[in-house]
């Protein structure tokens, strides 16, 4: 058995296990990387060098800073202030959805749902209305705009790490509008969809600003993370781990400040609990496995298959990449999918004699938005449904599809079209 066939079998086996045993994905990915080394496909030195430490450090620091930001109660206060400016439930639903989308461009999608959903529940209780459509709208909106910035979602960080993109590159890249414009164009056209879905909800909203914020340092740190990433974008020859140092450095400053302010070690414990170490280990394992299948020639073979299916046509290949990404991400986790497909789309572009940006951006649009089709397609959706179930509400698949499908189709089609018009 040659190395490529063996690598493909091992990779396929790993992916099947990732789908079946979702709670043990981090162990499966790490074990798969070890197997790749043991059978001689991937030398240990190559495995360690394949890990993108900048990506892992950015994720770690961002998770910690987001936890401090949530504890400060600032997101709740911002949502309450927003509700004071809307006339009725219909516009409250749109406002909360747009608000969660904007927040999720800088904060993890699940964290955004956990911040904004309680406000939506409070509005629904106040008006004795059904909270299910409102929480679903907040969840799918949170999942949408994570691809707009470098720190908005794990998949964005993966893209930036692979393509060596800075924070600014998401907005303006190689003299052209970046992926953020495509994401926001799709988000903008979901507003009419939300207005139509909530067209019968005309009850007036009376919200009070009751949340008290006494600690503004986490907010400053959140803003500081974005600002410093933008500043770092201006330097071409910066150290490889610069973004990671920024995110982790500000997180450490925040933790030390809270330890001094509260005179308690509880804050450090809560921040450590908020860091998803399993996802970090999963990514480390995936980086090594993908390096293994790359060295074995699997990536080139998959790229050739896409090129063959597309008949050498750039437009057909692009539609295939976006369409397949939307469909698969509706049922599988988009983190391992994007990590696997980034080198594939680069290989496809190379075989077609073009730069990889069109296909890479299309991949991110499809993989990010595809999760909104089904209740289990994105962690933000699972979190939103979990909140509703905890409150005693039963969410049917039909409840979710009624919002998720039109929302996804509009956002994905518009986003993919904008990417095509700019980068084709």
Image (spheres, rainbow, N blue to C red):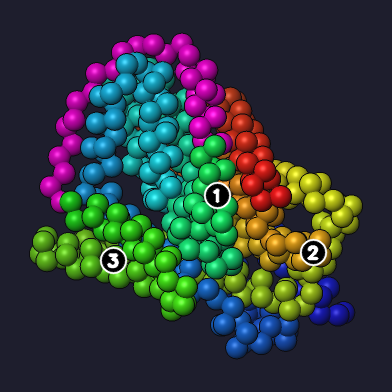
Estimate the x, y position of residue 369 in percent, counting from the top left: 59, 42
- Reply above or below: 153 against 246: above
- Reply above or below: 39 against 360: below
Q: Secondary structure at mark 3?
A: helix
**Circle 1 is placed at which residue position?**
177
Magenta stretch holds residue 310:
no
Q: Secondary structure at mark 2?
A: loop
Estimate the x, y position of residue 312 in percent, counting from the top left: 87, 55
For label 2, count other residues whose C-alpha is less than 10 Å away and answer few (under 14), some (14-19) or many (20+): few
Estimate the x, y position of residue 56 in percent, counting from the top left: 46, 69
**Circle 3 is placed at which residue position?**
250
Q: 392 or 285: which is nearer to us?
A: 285
Residue 35, image quadrant = bottom right
Q: Indicate the quadrant containing the N terminus: top left, top right, bottom left or bottom right.
A: bottom right
State the CA–CA distance, disc 1 to disc 3. 29 Å
- Start and end of the magenta stretch? 186-215
**Circle 2 is placed at which residue position?**
353
First in sequence: mark 3 vs mark 2: 3
First in sequence: mark 1 vs mark 2: 1
Estimate the x, y position of residue 390 in percent, counting from the top left: 39, 36
* Predominant SS of the magenta segment: loop
Q: Nearer the viewer, mark 1 or mark 3?
A: 1
Magenta stretch holds residue 209:
yes
């Amino acid at each position: 058995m040659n190395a490529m066939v063996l690598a493909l079998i091992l990779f396929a086996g790993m992916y099947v296990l990732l789908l079946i045993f979702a709670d043990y994905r981090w162990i499966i990915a790490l074990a798969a990387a070890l197997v790749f080394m043991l059978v001689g496909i991937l030398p240990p030195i190559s495995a360690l060098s394949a890990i993108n430490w900048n990506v892992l450090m950015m994720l770690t620091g961002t998770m910690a800073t987001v936890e401090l930001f949530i504890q400060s109660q600032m997101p709740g206060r911002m949502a309450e202030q927003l509700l004071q400016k809307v006339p009725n439930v219909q516009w409250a639903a749109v406002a909360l959805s747009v608000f969660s989308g904007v927040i999720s461009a800088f904060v993890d999608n699940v964290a955004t749902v956990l911040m904004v959903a309680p406000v939506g529940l409070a509005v629904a209780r106040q008006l004795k209305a059904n909270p299910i459509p409102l929480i679903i709208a907040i969840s799918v909106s949170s999942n949408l705009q994570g691809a707009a910035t470098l720190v908005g979602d794990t998949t964005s960080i993966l893209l930036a790490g692979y393509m060596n993109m800075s924070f600014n590159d998401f907005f303006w890249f190689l003299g052209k509008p970046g992926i953020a414009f495509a994401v926001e164009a799709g988000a903008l056209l979901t507003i009419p969809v939300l207005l139509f879905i909530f067209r019968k909800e005309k009850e007036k909203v009376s919200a009070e600003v009751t949340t008290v914020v006494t600690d503004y340092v986490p907010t400053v740190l959140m803003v500081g993370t974005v600002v410093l990433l933008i500043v770092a974008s201006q330097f071409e020859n910066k150290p490889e781990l610069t973004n990671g140092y920024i995110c982790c450095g500000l997180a450490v400053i925040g933790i030390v400040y809270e330890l001094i302010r509260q005179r308690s070690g509880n804050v450090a414990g809560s921040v450590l609990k908020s860091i998803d170490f399993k996802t970090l280990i999963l990514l480390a394992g995936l980086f090594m496995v993908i390096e293994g299948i790359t060295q074995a020639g699997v990536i080139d073979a998959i790229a050739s298959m896409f090129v063959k299916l597309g008949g050498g046509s750039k437009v057909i290949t692009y539609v295939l990449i976006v369409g397949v990404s939307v469909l698969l991400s509706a049922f599988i986790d988009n983190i391992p999918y994007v990590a696997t497909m980034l080198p594939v789309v680069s290989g496809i572009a190379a075989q077609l004699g073009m730069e990889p940006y069109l296909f890479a951006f299309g991949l991110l649009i499809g993989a990010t938005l595809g999760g909104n089709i089904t209740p289990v397609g994105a962690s933000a959706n699972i979190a939103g449904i979990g909140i509703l179930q905890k409150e005693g509400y039963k969410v049917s698949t039909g409840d979710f599809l009624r919002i998720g499908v039109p929302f996804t189709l509009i956002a994905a089609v518009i986003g993919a079209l904008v990417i095509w018009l700019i980068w084709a």
